[in-house]
Image (spheres, rainbow, N blue to C red):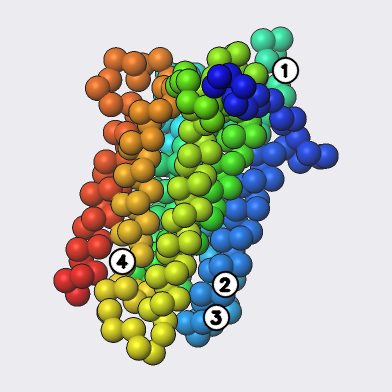
Amino acid sequence: MNELLYIVWNPSLSIGPFRWYSLCWLIGLALAYLVVKRLYQEQNIKDELFDPLFIYCFLGILIGARLGHCIFYQPDYFLTSGKGFVEMLLPIHFLADGGWKFTGYEGLASHGGTLGLMIALWLYVRKTKLSIWMVLDNIAIATGITACFIRLGNLMNSEIIGKVTDVPWAFIFERVDAVPRHPGQLYEAIAYAILFIIMWTIYKNNQKPTAKSQQLKVGSGWYFGFCLTYIFTFRFFIEYTKEIQEAFEASLPLDMGQILSIPFVVLGIICMIRAKAK
């Protein structure tokens, strides 16, 4: 009976001249840009302080996500040869005949992207002299919508697939195999969309003149802490429905995604406690 409900999934990798994955990244970043721009305007932060933020965020996420994948998931390939090191930095792949082809960045890790974003924002506040907690909170409010579209891009690429299952909503990723699997990318996309709704609702409610909770004000660090705690707690548990990405993870008590999630959860909780104490 369940077989009649399985979703056979094999979309085209591209729409016109754009790859779905790249397009989803761009949409997610563009929506975050609009959200944060509105937040800055509502908080009376000067436009000239907002203008460089997008560049810092884009480069921080891209560089961090790429290095995170290469260092944490495939160090034996990218860090053991000159060609691998070049492929880590440039969106190309060297061919056996000595040539090369443009591939885009095949392999981006969300944990690395998060760390890269945090470093980029630290550099940004050094330049603009804005409060680091205000910047982190504003970015956190918009993070869910970007993360949602990134995971939708993974879904369109049929990557980061789930484990074999017989649940009626299972996907058959035809580019991978012919068995039903958990759509882990879709689970995450939905969770991150819900995160954005929660964060936006809390922010708007605490903008009202009658709001009394100081710990939920932008600049307290609460939004940043809640964002980290929500995302990486969810990431920890959703990993149980996903296939391991690299063979070496099979010998670990937790997979790499779970191991890397723990420090971010701890940091998020600390930020929320700090906001409450303050």
Q: CA distance from mark 2 to mark 1?
A: 44 Å
Q: Which mark is residue 37?
A: 2
Residue extending farthest top:
97
Q: Label 3, on which residue?
A: 41
Q: Nearer the viewer, residue 262 or 183?
A: 183
* Mark 4 vs mark 2: in front: 4
Q: Which mark is residue 99?
A: 1
Q: Quadrant of the N terminus?
A: top right
Q: Is residue 78 above or below residue 136?
A: above
Q: Are marks 1 and 3 in contact (CB under 8 Å)?
A: no
Assign a secondary structure to mark 2: helix
Assign a secondary structure to mark 1: loop
* Mark 4 vs mark 1: in front: 4
Give how far across and how far down residue 254 sits, in percent: 28, 26
Q: Residue at x 55, y 80 (%)?
A: 41
Q: In this image, 176 relative to 79: left or right?
A: right
Q: In this image, 239 relative to 51: left or right?
A: left
Q: CA distance from mark 4 to mark 1?
A: 50 Å
Q: Are marks 4 and 1 in contact (CB under 8 Å)?
A: no
- Few, some or many residues within 10 Å of mark 4 (<14, 14–19, 20+): many
Q: Amino acid at mark 2?
A: Lys
- Mark 2 or mark 4, which is nearer the start of the sequence? 2
Q: Are marks 3 and 2 in contact (CB under 8 Å)?
A: yes
Tally the marks. 4
Residue 252 in sight in this render? yes
Q: Quadrant of residue 95?
A: top right
Give how far across and how far down residue 5 sits, in percent: 60, 26
Q: Amino acid at mark 3?
A: Gln
* Mark 2 vs mark 1: in front: 2
Q: CA distance from mark 3 to mark 2?
A: 6 Å
Residue 120 in sight in this render? no
- Mark 1 or mark 2, which is nearer the start of the sequence? 2
